[in-house]
Amino acid sequence: MITIKVPSSSANIGPGFDVIGLALSLFLELTVTFDSTDQNPLNCTVSCEGLGAEEVSLDPEVNLITRTALYVLKCHNQRQFPKGTHVNIINNIPLGRGLGSSGAAVVAGVSLGNEVGKLGLSKARMLDYCLMIERHPDNVAAALYGGFIGTYLNELDPEQASRKEIPLSEVLPEPAGGVDTGLKPPEPPLNIGHYIRFRWAKEIKCIVIIPDFEVATHKAREVLPTHYPRADVVFNMQRIALLATALGETPPDPDMIFEAMQDKGIYYAPSGHVVLTGVVHQPYRKGLIPGLTEILLSMTPKSHPGLLGICLSGAGPTILALATGNFESIADHILNDFKQQGITCEWKLLEPANDGMTAITT
Ligand SMILES: Nc1ncnc2c1ncn2[C@@H]1O[C@H](COP(=O)(O)OP(=O)(O)O)[C@@H](O)[C@H]1O
Ligand SMILES: N[C@@H](CCOP(=O)(O)O)C(=O)O
């Protein structure tokens, strides 16, 4: 039996759009067993329990995890799973909520291909495969390596860059294209992306407030501009520089962290009007998440002692609040704000998941 465990993740943490990721203690788990008397297309069956079980396809040609595993296998001239492979998915990551469920599924799929195909891929090479599928590195790198990380994509030479830009529909056709197409899918270039781990102060806990509706990440990316004013980019770079260090300092400095988690600046013009500056993703997404702006503006470390900072988790709709105490009252405030918009939520108190993806054969 093979057991693969992958953490959820919260990407961006305010200003770090497509850069910063934090692996969190909610997990996707696969148990993989083999019964060679089973005869199935692609030699694979899938079952699923836990969150999203009724939503997730059990067809191995459609399911994101098994399709990803098949992509990795086909790149290594293995056209199907080993005989009688059964993949049981146990999912604790809510789907489409900004907690990296798709990133975790892609990491789990790459690891599944690696394990059943006995490919011996390093985590660095697995990251290349992940980045051919989920092309922003923050979630997949956090899920693969664990902890609080900064990520980047390397400049590739033109031939490699064009391979990386191959449309997702060719890398990961849906359905997966069966056993016999004979075509090898586009292999990832080497060293597409990399990461660095930052320190995390152990007293900082992660409150996640998870609304009861989904926002598909690809839709939440469509609402973003392709170009930004220089002032906005500078604003966010200034905050990221703080963020990378401020969350590792003991004792945590609430005012510094609150500022470091801003993806917007509020400037009171001489006319008295409020002007927003320094905006990369959150405010553009407010149309998808009722109450977002009000929630982000409604709390500070002064109004809510214990609070360090607040932001949208990934592409939303989950809100991430970092805090050292008063977890319930901080969560209650955000639950109430969402309630005024007619939205019910659940909340959880999570910790960083330091291990990242693990795969164990027993
Ligand atoms: N455990 C899983 N098994 C199969 N597919 C999954 C799994 N988790 C996520 N997915 C796919 O990823 C989609 C959600 O991805 P996305 O919109 O990026 O949201 P997020 O990553 O923020 O949860 C789901 O609708 C589903 O298609
Ligand atoms: N940087 C990405 C992160 C998306 O995270 P997810 O958990 O919502 O998939 C973005 O902001 O689009």
Image: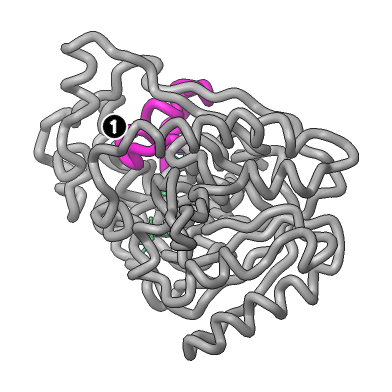
With 175 as the anchor, is 75 left or right in this view? Answer: right
**Quadrant of the image occupied by residue 230:** top left
Residue 272 % position (x, y): 48, 62
**x, y percent for residue 67:** 30, 48
Mark 1 Cα shell of 10 Å, populated few (<14), some (14-19), many (≥20): some
Q: Residue furthest top?
A: 157
Which residue is the extreme one toward the front? 271
Q: Looking at the image, which residue is at 56% across and 39% down?
A: 142
Looking at the rendered image, the quarter that the C terminus falls into is: top right
Magenta-colored segment: predominant secondary structure:
helix
Query: Of 325 and 236, which appears nearest the observer?
Result: 236
* Residue 349, above or below 147: below
User: Can you see residue 136?
Assistant: yes
- Splitting the image into 4 quarters, where does residue 80 fall? top left
List the residue tagged with mark 1: 78
Q: Is residue 14 magenta?
A: no
Give the residue drawn at x 48%, y 69%.
Answer: 292
Occupied quadrant, residue 251: top right
